[in-house]
Amino acid sequence: MSSNAQREADREPSHSGRLLLRMPKTLHAELAARSDAEGVSLNQYIVSALARAVSGEQQAPAAAPEAQRDRSLRTALVVNAVVVALAALTAIVVLIAAWR
């Protein structure tokens, strides 16, 4: 076994799963807000974010449904505007036809 492998093997048993981490208050507040938005504990959110960072994932899984919801809302508003415009145009045509 190489000396690097031996050092890693020696370190492994010492990983308790606990970590004290200091961070800026603004980052702590942002993480807390995002964990609340996702309905998970701050610890669970941070562990998930770290796991995604280590695995190389680019986007948080919860962001995809939010983006989909935004697109759906935008589409619904555009469809609604088109329907209202068609209804208004139809009403104007009917009024002009009735007036003659």
Image (cartoon, rainbow, N blue to C red):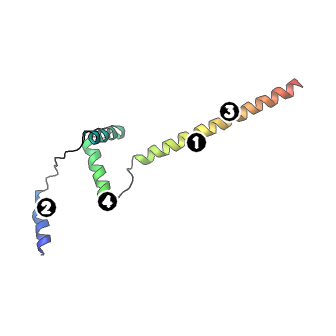
Q: Are marks 1 and 3 in contact (CB under 8 Å)?
A: no
Estimate the spatial distance between the alpha carbons at disc 4 and disc 1, rounded to whole Å: 34 Å
Look at mark 4 in the image and give the residue it sits on.
55
Disc 1 or 3, which lies upstream in sequence?
1
Asked where in the image residue 27 lies, by quadrant, the reply is top left
Residues under numbered marks 4 and 2 in contact, where contact means CB atoms less than 8 Å apart:
no
Q: Secondary structure at mark 4?
A: helix
Q: Earlier in the sequence, mark 4 or mark 3?
A: 4
- Is 48 located above or below residue 78 in the figure? below
How far is mark 4 from mark 2, CA to CA? 19 Å
Q: Which mark is residue 75?
A: 1
The percent coordinates of residue 91 (x first, y second) are 77, 29
* Disc sitting over residue 49 in the figure: none
What residue did someone put label 2 on? 12
Query: Looking at the rendered structure, which numbered label has been put on residue 84?
Result: 3
From the viewer's perspective, tell me whether residue 75 is left or right of residue 59. Answer: right
Q: CA distance from mark 1 to mark 3?
A: 14 Å
Q: Is residue 65 left or right of residue 75?
A: left
